[in-house]
């Protein structure tokens, strides 16, 4: 019953996303419900525990040699302000949703940089153990 409900939630989320991928980790219950690039920000919905996404995000930035400058986190929201080697600001917002999903917003630079945001997303995916091809 629980898996059936999760399936319906995934279908509903995919219907709302213009550019989406469904990737689920092997037996871990971790995956991506969808993502889209909107007004300079890459928005990703993960099916994963909030703290696991938080840790994966911090590790992904370290992997990419992006310097963290400011961190704020509580049980519902988190925000990381960082800087790339080229001086561009990176702002990552994480929101714990009551549905069990975690929303992540990634903005690189003032107006947004889709390619740089996707590199950060893929680094987070790797840290979460998610692999596969993205669907655009």
Image (cartoon, rainbow, N blue to C red):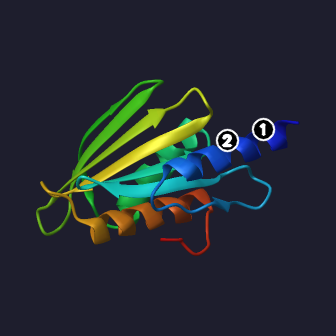
Is residue 81 positioned above or below 65 on the image?
above
- Say which mark, if any, is on residue 9: 2
Residue with the most extreme front position = 15
Query: What whole-number distance in Å separates the C-alpha atoms at marks 2 and 1?
Result: 6 Å
Query: Which of the pair 68/135 is nearer the observer?
Result: 135
Q: Is residue 46 left or right of residue 84?
A: right
Q: Is residue 30 left or right of residue 128?
A: right
**Residue holding disc 1:** 5
Query: Which of the pair 133/124 is nearer the observer?
Result: 133
Query: Which of the pair 25/12 is nearer the observer?
Result: 12
Crowd band around label 1 with a 10 angstrom C-alpha radius: few (<14), some (14–19), many (20+)? few
**Which residue is found at the position 47% from the left and 71% from the top?**
136
Report which quarter residue 128 is drawn in: bottom right
Residue with the most extreme right position = 1
The answer to whether the residue labelled 2 contacts the one labelled 1, judged by CB atoms less than 8 Å apart, is: yes
Crowd band around label 2 with a 10 angstrom C-alpha radius: few (<14), some (14–19), many (20+)? some
Instruction: Tell me where residue 84 appears, x and y as whole percent.
Output: 20, 63
**Which residue is found at the position 46% from the left and 51% from the top?**
44
Q: Quadrant of the N terminus?
A: top right
**Which residue is found at the position 61% from the left and 63% from the top?**
130
Report which quarter residue 112 is drawn in: bottom left
Instruction: Tell me where residue 87 appears, x and y as whole percent.
Output: 11, 63
- Say which mark, if any, is on residue 70: none
Residue with the most extreme bottom position = 133
Q: Secondary structure at mark 1?
A: helix
Report which quarter residue 36 is drawn in: bottom left
């Amino acid at each position: 019953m629980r898996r059936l409900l999760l399936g319906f939630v995934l279908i509903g989320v995919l219907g709302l996303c213009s550019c989406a991928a469904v990737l689920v980790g092997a037996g871990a219950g971790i995956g991506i419900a969808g993502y889209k690039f909107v007004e300079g920000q890459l928005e990703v919905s993960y099916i994963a525990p909030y703290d696991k996404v938080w840790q994966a995000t911090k590790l992904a930035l370290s992997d990419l040699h992006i310097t963290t400058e400011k961190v704020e986190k509580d049980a519902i929201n988190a925000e990381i302000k960082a800087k790339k080697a080229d001086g561009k600001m990176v702002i990552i917002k994480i929101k714990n949703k009551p549905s069990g999903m975690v929303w992540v917003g990634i903005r690189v630079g003032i107006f947004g940089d889709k390619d740089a945001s996707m590199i950060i997303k893929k680094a987070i995916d790797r840290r979460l153990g998610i692999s596969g091809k993205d669907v655009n």
